[in-house]
Amino acid sequence: MSGSTDTNVPHTELPVEAVSTVAPSQPHPTHTPLLQFDLVSKWYGPVLALNQVTLTLGGGITGLVGANGAGKSTLIKLATGQIRPSIGRVTVGGLDAADWRARRFIGYCPDHDAFYEDMTGRQFVREMARLFGFTSHEVRTRTEAVLDRVNMTTAADRVMRGYSKGMRQRIKLAQALLHDPGLLILDEPLSGIDPIGRREMLDLFASLAAAGKGLLVSSHELEELEKLTGHVVLMGRGRVAAVGTIAEIRDRLDHLPSRVRIEVADPFGLARLLLGTEGVLGVEMESGGEALIVRTKQVKPFADRFAALVVEHGLNVRQFEPLDESLHAILGYLLGGSGKT
Amino acid sequence: MPTPTDSLLRYRPWKGTFRPPVFGAFAMARAGLTVLLRRKLFWAVYALAGLVFFFYFYMQYLVIWVQQQTADRTAVVAGVPIRLSEFTKFLERVNMNGTGLTFGNFIWFEGYVAMIVLALAGAVLVGNDFHHGSLPFYLAKPIARRHYILGKVLGVGAFVNLLTTIPAICLWIQAGLLYGWQTYYAERFPLLLGILGYGAALTLVLSLLLVASAVFVRRTVPLVMVWCGIFVLCPALANFLAFNQSLGTTWRLIDLWNDLYIVGLWLLGVPTTEARSGFEQPPVWQAAIALAVVCLGAVAYLGRRIRAVEVVS
């Protein structure tokens, strides 16, 4: 995998500007990005699945979120070279994604697990390893290494027909890691895995990212995704609605006030204080009268001012909770509805 | 204190160079063969193929041995000396004596067995990649679509050759040992080329046809029905049109199995008048064109359909 190492950039250097609808695309970075979409559109017959997507990804973990039919799967298939764009260009490590050589940079873990069910896990991973053109010795060593990496060595000799969903996910991940790719594309890698398994998988993803790899993780498990990464690509109706960290995207939605729930001993007194405070757009009393819902332009400056108020007036604050800083809420703002995917 | 990369110590970065993608195609062929050999149900059909082979093997041994034993001998019957070879002449009509027709007929029979297995296994070998969606596992690897097709065709081809060409070569070697290897192998060398040619034609046509039809129908029962249509219904229709309706031998071309047989006999140097059906046959060049059209059609179809996703409406 020469060529992939010099393309790995730290997560912090990711170009956040690669937004197709929220902001115009910026010039490409001087280094070769791991994955790049240039004004890519894809039609399936009369159906427009992806609409003028421009996107640049480097190292680190990036979440890919959106409702069903948003175009996530099409984007992944384009990135892995399984389909060609109708318009535009997709490159992986500088190579056209449809070129088979580009797939040496990519490890792909599909969402469905259609295997040769009568093979054992080890046999399946070996068969996949042979597709890369490894020698027999390399096939064995790489297979054992990845099985160990995903913690499947002990169960690898069982027939896959009897595997649990979590085991299948691990085997799929193992075959994606075989060639030590610079970019891992994971489609719903957490679905069907129990909480302990999820923790292990999240740790594995984090360690891979720490080793300099780029991970594009498509998932409907937004809470888990938020634990894994703050950097997301939000998709809706075939477009990339926004790219960046959750906080950055939320800040860009400055026309939509943020809501903060504050639980204090004297909510009416606090309401009086807040109405005159800079940055507060409105205050509502929660039903029951135990807490206030404050609408503010940006949460962080408000939090600073609120902290000063607490000290100055000796307020007894029981809870301070931003209500719509989550990925769910942002998705709801951008795409409409509750943000449920 | 542990670091996040501690657990990566066993999983080492890949430093080597990859071999060309054609090795991926070989790997796919190997996986396909493994699937075919792993199914216990198919071993009943392999036993049938084994029976056909051993029948030919021992019959060839018997026929040649009898012919050699009686070649120069005479028997006196009621005081009249008669050459024994006159009594055993009928054995030549059995066509199990190391001639072109021996190998042509043998491959014809064994090919039918291969066809039955392929009809049953096509869905597992190819159709499931589309039906269950395992194609992305292949297409996301560093191989092109042509390597995928090549891998599947190689797997089917290897299987067809295991059941037809290789046993036929064994029979050719056996015949040489029975007749006398000093003369037989040199004089009948074109037969070996003919066997290889017939095997290649079978491989090409059956593998492309199987992969294309399995991509088209994907599941076992429809695939068996399609193959029954091609190799049972079409021959019956061909005979009906060509002979019952007297529309001419050109209509026999829709019998693909017969086309393969005619081309195979031509490669083995046997005139089509000696073909086993006994009916009048179309010219070899027409049969060859019919096979080429089928192959090109299959390749064109596969080129369009080997895609991970399909057009949705």
Image: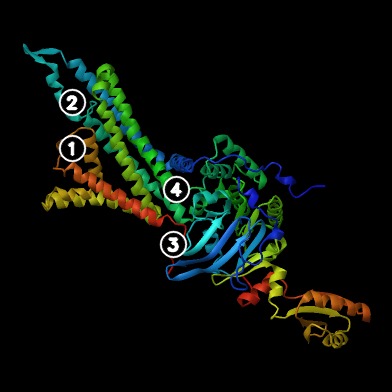
SS type, badge 4: helix
| Chain letter for mark 2 | B
Type of amino acid at the residue the image marks with label 4? Tyr
C-alpha distance separating marks 3 and 4: 17 Å
SS type, badge 2: helix
C-alpha distance separating marks 1 and 3: 45 Å
Residue that mark 2 sits on:
B91
Q: Say which label, 1 or 3, has the lower sequence index.
A: 1
C-alpha distance separating marks 4 and 2: 48 Å
Type of amino acid at the residue the image marks with label 2? Leu
Q: Say which label, 3 or 4, has the lower sequence index.
A: 4
Evaluate whether residue A316 shows in this view. no
Residue that mark 4 sits on:
B148
Residue that mark 3 sits on:
B310
Type of amino acid at the residue the image marks with label 3? Glu
Question: How many residues crowd mark 4 within 10 Å: few (<14), some (14–19), many (20+)?
Answer: many
